[in-house]
Image (cartoon, rainbow, N blue to C red):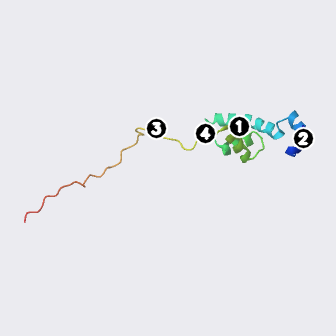
Amino acid sequence: MRRLCEVLEVHPSGYYAWRRNPHSQRHHEDQRLLALVEPSWVDSGRVYGYRKVHHDLCDLGESCSRHRVARLMRSRGWRAQVGYRRRPGFHGGIPHNVAANILYAVHLPHNC
């Protein structure tokens, strides 16, 4: 193992520390934040983006950056819904005044 660590230019104690605990403190903190981000995103109807989710986390008293929330949401494939489509069909309202069609009006020639 020491030879492998020499080749990879890694200190053996660092390798054994990684082997004991492969996940960093940041990874554990990210998992805790994801547990808070998911309900906020799902409760919004999967509409909220990272800005509004970050605002919800701030309301809960969590301190993290918007970029971290964006990275966590991106890692799960969670995105904001952009725009809303109207359903096809009649949307009500009063019809507009339509001008008469005078393009095909035929004028008779004048008798000379």
Camera-side residue: 10 or 39? 10
The residue tagged 4 is 47
Apparent side of residue 5 relative to residue 36 in the rendered image (left or right): right
Q: Which mark is residue 25?
A: none
In this rendering, the label closer to the viewer, 2 or 4: 2
Q: Which residue is mark 1?
A: 37
Q: Position of residue 83 (x, y in %)?
A: 54, 44
Q: CA distance from mark 4 to mark 1?
A: 13 Å
- Position of residue 98 in the picture relative to residue 4 (left or right): left
**In the rendered structure, which disc, 3 or 2, sits on the residue that comes first in sequence?**
2
Marks 3 and 2 sit apart, C-alpha to C-alpha, by 66 Å
Question: Going from the N terminus, do you reach mark 1 or mark 3 first?
Answer: 1
Q: Earlier in the sequence, mark 4 or mark 3?
A: 4
Q: Which mark is residue 3?
A: 2
The answer for how far apart the CA atoms under marks 2 and 4 are is: 52 Å
Image height check: is 32 above or below 110? Answer: above
Nearer-N-terminus badge (4/1): 1
Q: Position of residue 20 (x, y in %)?
A: 88, 33
Kind of residue indicated by mark 4: Val
Label 1 and label 3: CA atoms lie apart by 30 Å
Question: Which residue bears the numbered disc 3?
Answer: 87
| x and y percentages locating residue 98 in the rendered image | 31, 50
Mark 4–mark 3 Cα distance, whole angstroms, equals: 18 Å
Type of amino acid at the residue the image marks with label 3: Arg
**Which SS class for mark 4?**
loop
Of helix, strand and loop, which one carries label 3?
loop
Amino acid, disc 1: Val
Element at label 1: helix
